[in-house]
Image (cartoon, helix red, strand yellow):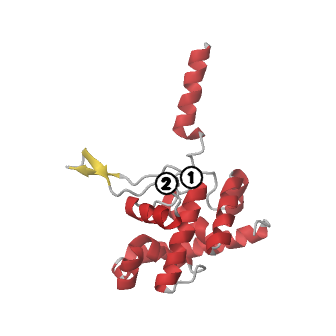
Amino acid sequence: MSRLLRLGVLLLLVSCGGGQNSAPRNLDNACSIIDQRPTYLKAMQRAERKWGVPVHVQMATIYQESKFVANARTPHKYALGIIPMGRQSSAYGFSQAIDGTWDDYRKATRRFGARRNKIDDATDFMGWYMDQSEQKLGLSKWDARNQYLAYHDGHRGYARGSYREKAWLMRVADEISQRADLYQLQLIGCGKI
């Protein structure tokens, strides 16, 4: 096989998920995720030290938002079911932060070079946002359920109680709380926290 053909095959494999944009295997096991991507744990531990948001709460939120895919985006909207009309929102990256909130974070923390598809930046953003949720709304950083509701609906939406009208969101928030508890037990079991 020629060098050019081998290079083309390699590039195709990397672009189809072989690179770091793909999700780790076995997303139901926190220890497996950390074993495959040790940099994720380091990033989450830095965010925990800086902002006080526990690793397992960050992990459960990232699982829900992006399934640990660095360049995750929301699905496209379609007109008449076939004509692409852009994305459902500007949410992007590990944390699925939308453009406006990401800009607020970069200004507030003076991290102007931060990128949503970098785990260090995404976990720092998540820590910052959940710290704001504690300051503005009185939510414990250990409360994965309510932190997620505020994360999803925004601080004003949470304060208004908009999530109460979304049965599907309440169910998702309960699932995140359960996943955070599971991840915490797993991380303790494998000695990562």
| Residue behind mark 2 | 93
In terms of image quadrants, where is residue 156?
bottom left
Give me the C-alpha separation between circle 2 and circle 1. Answer: 8 Å
Q: Position of residue 27 (x, y in %)?
A: 61, 58
Vertical placement of residue 16 versus 155, above or below: above
Give residue 106's position: percent from left, percent from top. 48, 61
Location of residue 65 with respect to 175 vertically, above or below: above
**Residue sitting at x 68%, y 71%:** 49
Quarter of the view holding residue 140:
bottom right
| Residue 73 placement (x, y as % from top left) | 43, 52
The residue located at (59%, 22%) in the rendering is 7
Q: Residue at x 49, y 49 (%)?
A: 71
Q: Who's the residue at 45% across and 76% down the image?
A: 149
Q: Which of the two marks, 2 or 1, is nearer to us in this view?
A: 1
Residue type, numbered disc 1: Lys
In front: 60, or 43? Answer: 43
Q: Nearer the viewer, residue 129 or 5?
A: 129
